[in-house]
Amino acid sequence: MSAEPPPPPAAQVPAFAELAARPVKVASSPAPPSAPNVPNRLRGLAAGQRPRERALSLGVGALDDLELTALILRSGTAGLDVLTLAERLLAEAGSLHALARWREADFRRLKGIGRVKAVQLCTVFEIARRVLGAERRLAPELSDPESIYAYLRPSAFGLEVEKCWVLALNSRNRLLRCAELTSGTANQTLVRTAEVLREAVREAATGFILAHNHPSGDPEPSSADLRITRQIRSAADALEIRLHDHLVVGDPAIDKHGLGYYSFKRGGHL
């Protein structure tokens, strides 16, 4: 057998420790491109033209959808001002009306909208839905004595004292608010013209209905009822607020006409 070749000299074999100590060269990846520098639109606006300042000076009704959305968001995010964020939100949804159907997860898909902002937006639209729903359920149209009587009878039934109500209406005769104005004695209630009109003005009503009950059940108006009606109508005309009717609520079983109410409009006094 031939002899094995002699091992290389020790100096030619690198030790393991020496290999481990040698630096390893790793190819560096290219740096990611920097984010585009988006101008801050909010800062570019004059102070009086920013959404918050416009809302304070003109009221929120003067703002467009973009400005209203920006006010709800309150602030933008890094590299994205609130106006641009609001614009992207509306563009993604298609309209403010479509945005109202979004849920929290939908809002959070957009960069710059975290959980807090998403919940804020959902809250605003939920309030709007409840208000609209309440109007559909609770705002009757009071355009004739029959509908007024039907609305007031549960409140007047069985009362042993006279009460007076002011029913503020919008331009479509929809009820804005029914306010109990005074509560008197068994045969009279004290009504001040200024208090009646204050309720209508407070609700920005275009018109109102005055109503009171007769605990006796007989809705026939008294001379005092006629006098007060004339006074209130004259004052309402001066304010360009229409007094639609004055209804006296009674009991059909006692009313000689069997109606249970007396309408000053039907009676020719308005």
Image: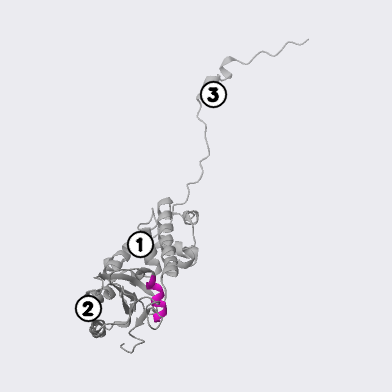
- Within-10-Å neighbours for mark 2: few <14, some 14–19, many 20+: some
Residue extent of the magenta highlight: 144-153
Left or right: where does residue 9 sit relative to residue 142? Answer: right
Q: Which residue is mark 3?
A: 19
Mark 1 and mark 2 in contact? Answer it, CB < 8 Å. no
The x, y position of residue 240, in whole percent, is: 27, 84
Which residue is at 45% across, 61% downward?
A: 89
Q: Quadrant of the C terminus?
A: bottom left
- For mark 1, give the secondary structure: helix
Q: Quadrant of residue 249?
A: bottom left
Which residue is at 35% across, 83% downward?
A: 263
Q: Amino acid at mark 1?
A: Leu
Q: Quadrant of residue 165?
A: bottom left
**Which mark, residue 193?**
2
Is residue 148 covered in magenta?
A: yes
Is residue 253 covered in magenta?
A: no
Q: Quadrant of the N terminus?
A: top right
**Which mark, residue 71?**
1
Q: Is residue 202 above or below residue 234?
A: above
- Give the mark nearest the N terminus, 1 or 2: 1
Mark 2 and mark 3 in contact? Answer it, CB < 8 Å. no
- Give the mark nearest the N terminus, 1 or 3: 3
Give the CA distance from mark 2 to mark 3: 103 Å
Which residue is at 30% across, 70% downward?
A: 179
- Of circles 1 and 3, the one toward us is 1
